[in-house]
Image: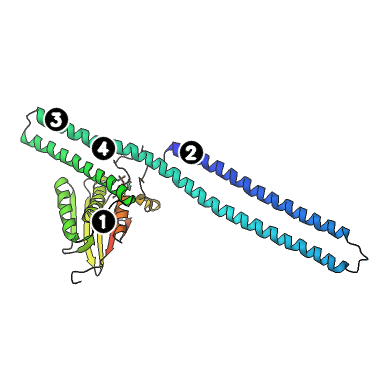
Amino acid sequence: MDIFTKKRLAIASVVYWLLLAYIVVALVWWFIALENQNHRMADYKFSELKLDDPAFQSKYQAIADEMRIKDVQYIGEGATFLVVILIASIFVYQAVRRQIRLQSQQENFMMAITHELKTPIAVAKLNLETLLKYSLSDDKKLKMLQATLQETNRLNTLVSNILVSSQLEGGRYRMAKEELELSDLVKTTVSEFRNRFPERHWQCEIDSEIDINGDPLLLQILVNNLIENAIKYAPKESPITIKLLQKGKTINFQVIDEGPGIPDNEKRQIFEKFYRIGNETTRTAKGTGLGLYLCKKIVEDHDGHIRVTDNLPRGSNFMVSFTVKHTHEQ
Ligand code: ADP
């Protein structure tokens, strides 16, 4: 959270709590005033009673009963009102905080996205212009083309993430679920990543013939995003482990890295839209905070679960599990 957002949150909180304190104090004050009035009325009625009146006892009792009933009524109404105000204020407070946080994350996202879109385009353009203008050695040409391809891939992931998340949110994405071999999808994706990042150390344990009923494009985005994060956040020399295993009706897909890991208090938040660990000044890796949000949405749309745990001794372990509903025999 940046300083500006923190300041806005602090001001909103102070104004809010002052207003709430005023409402509670006013409520208590009205309660005391009503109680006093009630007792004064009863005292007045008592003073109007005549001692020699044969109905004195019953009239006295009636006034005392009325006073008690009003006491109970004021206490009951006051307490209900207070509880309703407190519950409502907690809801409003949480909603305001969420809104301010979302707004600031959205602003960060806009800044990040402008940068993320412009950089790969600029790099690709420069590389292509250089290739056109100068006659380079084959080795240099290859390096430049590889770099350009890498930038295009980054751009592709980014654009897919943005488009698909906005379509999924607006309910405009029509899921094309089909029976597909997840093993193939994961194997092909990993071999593409191996080609793109040959310097990384890949460890794979991918069972064959694991089928799933799912949307190929969405599952591809899920696998890409998790692997890309491992590449992005874990040191270059550390291994990346990819596992796809099936136990009974449960399919488990894991991407394990030996990077910085995710602090316990952020293990849930990283799946929120635009959420990124750290702040704009401490962050070194590029990103938009959309990747894991989209992963969670995709997994849930396939009735699965995603979570992250610590990998020991270091790093994180992203675990996705799906339950197989249909088999080939059906
Ligand atoms: P982005 O990578 O674009 O910032 P994500 O939604 O993919 O967005 O991830 C959200 C945040 O979770 C990242 O900013 C990063 O701080 C953290 N994160 C994601 N994957 C990893 C990982 N494998 N290791 C450490 N931190 C991670």
Left or right, 64 with reference to 82: right
Query: Which of 73 and 202 lies nearest the eye of the viewer?
Result: 73
Type of residue at label 4? Leu
Count of numbered marks:
4
3 and 1 marks in contact (CB < 8 Å):
no
Whichever of labels 3 and 2 marks the residue nearer the N terminus, that label is 2
- Helix, strand or loop at label 2? It is helix
Q: Residue at x 26, y 56 (%)?
A: 175
Residue at left 30%, top 49%?
A: 167
Q: Circle 3 sits in a helix, a strand or a loop, which is it?
A: helix
Residue position marked by numbered label 1 in the rendering: 175
For disc 3, the marked residue is 129
Tell whether label 4 touches label 3 (CB within 8 Å): no
Q: Which mark is residue 117?
A: 4
Sequence-wise first label, 3 or 4: 4
Nearer the viewer's eye, disc 3 or disc 1?
Answer: 1
- Dot 1 amino acid type: Met
Disc 4 beta carbon < 8 A from ligand 1? no
Q: How many angstroms separate mark 3 from mark 2 (CA)?
A: 46 Å
Looking at the image, residue 286 lies above or below residue 225: above
> Looking at the image, is mark 4 or mark 2 nearer the viewer?
4
- The residue identified by callout 2 is 8
Instruction: Report if the beta carbon of the residue with label 1 is closer than 8 angstroms to ligand 1.
Output: no
> What is the spatial separation of the Cα atoms under label 4 and label 1, in whole angstroms?
27 Å
- Which residue is rendered at x = 16% and y = 58% of the image? 184
The tag earlier along the polypeptide, 3 or 1, is 3
